[in-house]
Image (cartoon, rainbow, N blue to C red):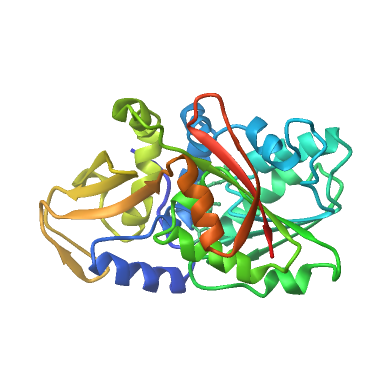
């Protein structure tokens, strides 16, 4: 059980969460905000999670191609959903080793608390760092246009399977497209579902207390005690699904929840091979290069905005 004191990051988050709780399906974004930023940080530092978010090599492969000569870098980089910043720091170190470190870096995230955490691992890189709050499920943002140096391309990043969590990944990819300019690039890394997926293997990184604590933290912030939550995981078609089964009658945020009810609090959509490229193109991007790791469980795509 987590010993974190549970809270929402803002009154606005609390109000939005309450509406979703009434429908018994809460978006995953709340698991990264408020006290969720702390339970997520514990998760992001765990070994199993590294397996879920993937590796760096195939991201570099998508950026530069196997020859290493492809042009996938830019002097101004905007990352969306940086998590705790460790993945970002690893990518920045790899770019620095190639002499391609950006001089300006913008991080955008749903959670201000998480953006504060990200400051630490990025402080060692000599670049101008800015951050701003953006809910990428709510429409396009003007933050990138306000921040960018005009007439120079931006490289957008969405790493570590961030695109698997939103309710509607296609609209998030469109919102990214509408927030960037023609000539800009985006690198997206995703978790893939191999043809013959082994359910036990796919679910194993999620079957631990640290993950359960992170997934149910927003429900605890809503006032549902952990003792009344049984966390249930399954792979349904292409989705890893996590439901909280409430084991006793409880009233949370003024909402009566009966013993036995399920609240959907986690979803991570996997993509099948070529399907993800089609989704990126359907959102208005042109795919430049794709890469996969050796297990065909992780992929990365570099795309340009026409
Ligand atoms: C799965 S974590 C990935 C973290 C990191 N990129 C990595 O590779 O370790 C998802 C990230 O996306 C952010 N996020 C989730 N939903 C979001 C939303 N609707 N709008 C903006 N950011 C969101 C989370 O706060 C978190 O930083």
Examine the image and state in which quarter residue 122 appears: top right
Residue 290, position in %: x, y? 62, 41
The residue nearer to you, when weighing 70 against 150, is 70
Examine the image and state in which quarter residue 3 appears: top left
Location of the N terminus (image quadrant) = top left
Name the outermost residue toward the right. Answer: 99
Up-down relation of residue 103 to residue 283 (above or below): above
**Going 64% across and 33% down the picture, which residue do you hit?**
58
Examine the image and state in which quarter residue 104 appears: bottom right
Residue 145, position in %: x, y? 74, 73
Up-down relation of residue 108 to residue 70 (above or below): below
**Going 36% across and 49% down the picture, which residue do you hit?**
267
Residue 161, position in %: x, y? 51, 45
**Going 45% across and 49% down the picture, which residue do you hit?**
164
Residue 191, position in %: x, y? 48, 39
Q: Is residue 83 left or right of residue 76?
A: left
Location of the C terminus (image quadrant) = bottom right
* Residue 183 seen from this side: yes
Q: Is residue 179 left or right of residue 161?
A: right
* Residue 37 seen from this side: no
């Amino acid at each position: 059980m987590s010993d974190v004191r549970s809270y929402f990051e803002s009154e606005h988050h609390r109000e939005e969460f309450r509406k979703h709780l009434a429908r018994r399906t809460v978006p995953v974004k709340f698991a990264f905000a408020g006290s969720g930023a702390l339970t997520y940080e514990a998760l992001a530092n765990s070994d199993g999670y590294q397996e879920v978010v993937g590796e760096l090599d195939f991201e570099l492969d998508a950026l530069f191609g196997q020859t290493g000569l492809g042009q996938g870098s830019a002097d101004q980089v905007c990352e969306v959903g940086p998590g705790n910043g460790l993945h970002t720091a690893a990518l920045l170190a790899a770019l620095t080793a190639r002499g391609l470190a950006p001089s300006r870096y913008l991080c955008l995230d749903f959670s201000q608390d998480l953006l504060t955490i990200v400051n630490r691992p990025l402080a060692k890189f000599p670049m101008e760092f800015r951050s701003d709050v953006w809910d990428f499920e709510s429409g396009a943002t003007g933050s990138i246009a306000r921040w960018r140096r005009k007439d120079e391309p931006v490289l957008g990043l969405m790493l570590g399977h961030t695109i698997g969590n939103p309710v509607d990944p296609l609209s998030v990819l469109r919102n990214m497209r509408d927030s960037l300019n023609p000539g800009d690039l985006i690198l997206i890394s995703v978790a893939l579902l191999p043809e013959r997926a082994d359910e036990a293997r796919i679910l194993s990184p999620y079957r631990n207390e640290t993950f359960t604590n992170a997934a149910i933290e927003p429900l605890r912030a809503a006032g549902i005690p952990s003792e009344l939550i049984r966390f249930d995981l399954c792979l349904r078609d292409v989705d890893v699904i996590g439901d909280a089964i409430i084991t006793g009658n409880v009233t949370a945020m003024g909402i009566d929840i009966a013993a036995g009810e399920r609240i959907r609090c986690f979803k991570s959509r996997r993509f099948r091979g070529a399907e993800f490229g089609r989704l990126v193109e359907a959102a208005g991007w042109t795919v430049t290069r794709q890469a996969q790791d050796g297990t065909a469980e992780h992929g990365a795509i570099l795309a340009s905005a026409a």
